[in-house]
Image: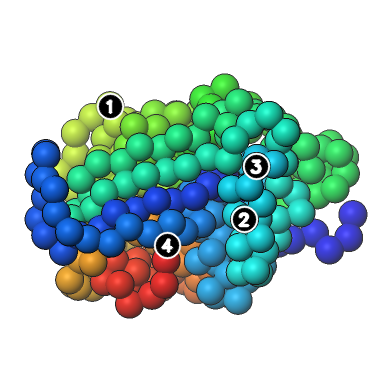
């Protein structure tokens, strides 16, 4: 095994179709705005942000052999992402995500990630066939894993020896999939990135602050938990204690992808041996720049 990437991003790689308006919106709103199509998905968003930090992550996912998939691979490769380990399916279409955002935030979104779920363990083949690792020499780099995988596959990953040597970082993808991360509370070897709502769903409890939520996640078995709460105080907890930081106050221009940016920036900071407090603050600053529209998608 040669030229093994130091970072893997495992999960959703798809097309983001995002409609954005400067107007506040409600149910039934019909307003002018802009519609864009960009490479997206949680794993892709994390990988693109890591690339902006001059890192070279590899993607493990499924992309169809259709025209949409070919274009997606071409664009991702052009961005400098390693796409050679992506499973290309003959019979599954390339996944898509559609969202509508107004001046008052995310209005609605639909994730059509059925192909990722259908592909299942096939996307992990490079980790056991010797390409990136195997049972005798499991992959030992950093892994960003997203909750768009099925609960069954996430449960397997949580206890699979193929992941035992990796620095595993996990995010739920959306509040609706937060509970899929519960296996990582049982195994105590992953860092979990969630917002306050996702933490409440995962713990099946209500919390007043990110500090309460992060502490509860560690108490329930997470090795480490980072919890954000929009523009309010964010927190990180592990066995050594709790750290806090306030995100910079900015005008919100977009929200889709902010959590992915936070996670990638935190990973980058720790790869550069930042202290836990500095890593948390750097991640919040990067997410704020993204939300304000200062940085690219």
Residue at figure coordinates x 50%, y 35% from the top left: 113
Q: Is residue 177 above or below residue 79?
A: above
Secondary structure at badge 3 equals loop
Of the image marks 4 and 2, the number of the one nearer the N terminus:
2
**Marks 2/1: CA–CA distance:** 41 Å
Looking at the rendered image, the quarter that the C terminus falls into is bottom left
Of the image marks 2 and 3, the number of the one nearer the N terminus:
3
Of the image marks 2 and 1, the number of the one nearer the N terminus:
2
Point out residue 152 in the picture as x, y percentages from the top left corner. 57, 22
Question: Can you tell which of label 1 and label 3 is closer to the viewer?
Answer: 3
Total count of labels: 4
Residue 61 lies left or right of residue 256; in this view the side is: right
Residue that label 2 marks: 71
Q: Label 3 near label 2: C-beta < 8 Å?
A: no
Residue that label 1 marks: 204
Residue 251 lies left or right of residue 66; in this view the side is: left
Question: Can you tell which of label 2 and label 1 is closer to the viewer?
Answer: 2
Inspect this view and state whether residue 138 appears. no
Point out residue 178 in the picture as x, y percentages from the top left corner. 38, 34
Secondary structure at badge 1 equals loop
Secondary structure at badge 4 equals helix
CA neighbours of label 1 inside 10 A, class few (<14), some (14 to 19), many (20+): few
Residue that label 3 marks: 66
Of the image marks 1 and 3, the number of the one nearer the N terminus:
3
């Amino acid at each position: 095994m040669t030229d093994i990437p130091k970072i893997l991003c495992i999960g959703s790689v798809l097309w983001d179709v995002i409609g954005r308006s400067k107007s506040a919106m409600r149910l039934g709103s019909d307003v002018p705005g802009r519609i864009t199509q960009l490479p997206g998905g949680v794993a892709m968003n994390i990988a693109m942000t890591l690339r902006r930090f001059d890192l070279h992550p590899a993607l493990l996912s499924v992309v169809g052999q259709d025209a949409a998939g070919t274009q997606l691979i071409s664009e991702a490769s052009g961005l400098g992402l390693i796409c050679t380990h992506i499973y290309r399916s003959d019979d599954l279409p390339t996944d898509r995500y559609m969202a509508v955002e107004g001046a008052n935030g995310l209005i609605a979104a639909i994730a059509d990630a059925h192909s990722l779920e259908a592909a299942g363990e096939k996307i992990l083949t490079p980790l056991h066939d010797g390409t990136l690792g195997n049972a005798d020499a499991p992959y030992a780099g950093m892994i960003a894993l997203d909750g768009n995988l099925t609960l069954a596959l996430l449960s397997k990953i949580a206890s699979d020896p193929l992941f035992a040597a990796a620095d595993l970082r996990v995010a739920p993808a959306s509040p609706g999939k937060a509970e899929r991360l519960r296996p990582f509370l049982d195994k105590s070897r992953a860092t979990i990135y969630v917002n306050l709502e996702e933490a409440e769903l995962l713990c099946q409890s209500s919390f007043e602050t990110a500090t309460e939520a992060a502490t509860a996640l560690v108490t329930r078995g997470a090795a480490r938990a980072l919890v954000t709460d929009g523009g309010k105080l964010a927190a990180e907890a592990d066995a050594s204690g709790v750290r806090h930081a306030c995100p910079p106050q900015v005008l919100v221009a977009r929200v889709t992808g902010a959590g992915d940016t936070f996670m990638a920036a935190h990973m980058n900071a720790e790869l550069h041996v930042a202290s836990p407090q500095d890593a948390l603050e750097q991640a919040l600053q990067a997410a704020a720049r993204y939300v304000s529209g200062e940085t690219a998608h």
